[in-house]
Image (cartoon, rainbow, N blue to C red):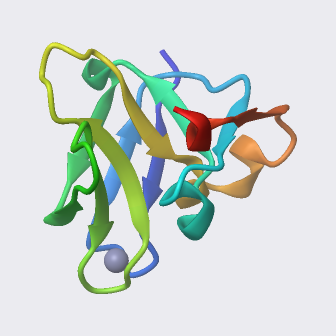
C-alpha cells in the first residue's frame, strides 16, 4: 500500500492518502476556480485528516470545502451526505513529485 503524506503550508493540518493518484482533476466551478485545487477523488476510507480544518459550504450545500484557519490552504472537500462515498483531496498539499507529471482532467463543474 502506497501512503502519501501532505500538509497545509503551516503544518496545522496533515493529510495521509493511502491511494496512488494516476491523474488530477481541475474544476471550473465557482469555488474550485478560485482556490485552484488539484483534486484527487477517492473514497473517504483511504484518507486520514489530522488537525482542525474549517468547513465552508455554499449554494446547494452538497459539499463542504475545508481549509486551514492559520495559513488558509484548502486541503480537501467532503460530501455533506454521508452516503456519498467520495471526497476530494487537494494534491497541492503534497510533494509536487506526486502530481506535477500526471495528466490533468478539466471537470466542468460550472455547468452542473
Ligand atoms: Zn495551515
Q: Is residue 84 above or below residue 81?
A: above
Q: Nearer the viewer, residue 60 or 46?
A: 60
Residue 32 found in image quarter: bottom right
Image quadrant, ligand 1: bottom left
Percent position (x, y) of residue 10?
A: 38, 81
Q: Is residue 49 above or below residue 46?
A: below
- Extreme-bottom residue of the structure: 70
Percent position (x, y) of residue 47?
A: 32, 32
Which residue is painted at 85% across and 32% down in the image?
Answer: 103
Residue 72 found in image quarter: bottom left
Percent position (x, y) of residue 105?
A: 77, 32
Q: Nearer the viewer, residue 108 or 41?
A: 108
Which residue is painted at 31% across and 67% down in the image?
Answer: 67
Residue 46 found in image quarter: top left
Q: Nearer the viewer, residue 23 or 26?
A: 26
Which residue is painted at 63% across and 44% down in the image?
Answer: 27
Amino acid at each position: 500500500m502506497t501512503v502519501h503524506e501532505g500538509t497545509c503550508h503551516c503544518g496545522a493540518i496533515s493529510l495521509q492518502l493511502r491511494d496512488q493518484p494516476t491523474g488530477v482533476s481541475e474544476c471550473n466551478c465557482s469555488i474550485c476556480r478560485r482556490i485552484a485545487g488539484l483534486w484527487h477523488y477517492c473514497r473517504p476510507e483511504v484518507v486520514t485528516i489530522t488537525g482542525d480544518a474549517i468547513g465552508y459550504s455554499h449554494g446547494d450545500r452538497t459539499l463542504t470545502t475545508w481549509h486551514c484557519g492559520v495559513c488558509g490552504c484548502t486541503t480537501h472537500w467532503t460530501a455533506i451526505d454521508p452516503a456519498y462515498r467520495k471526497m476530494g483531496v487537494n494534491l497541492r498539499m503534497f510533494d509536487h513529485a506526486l502530481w506535477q507529471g500526471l495528466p490533468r482532467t478539466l471537470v466542468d463543474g460550472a455547468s452542473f
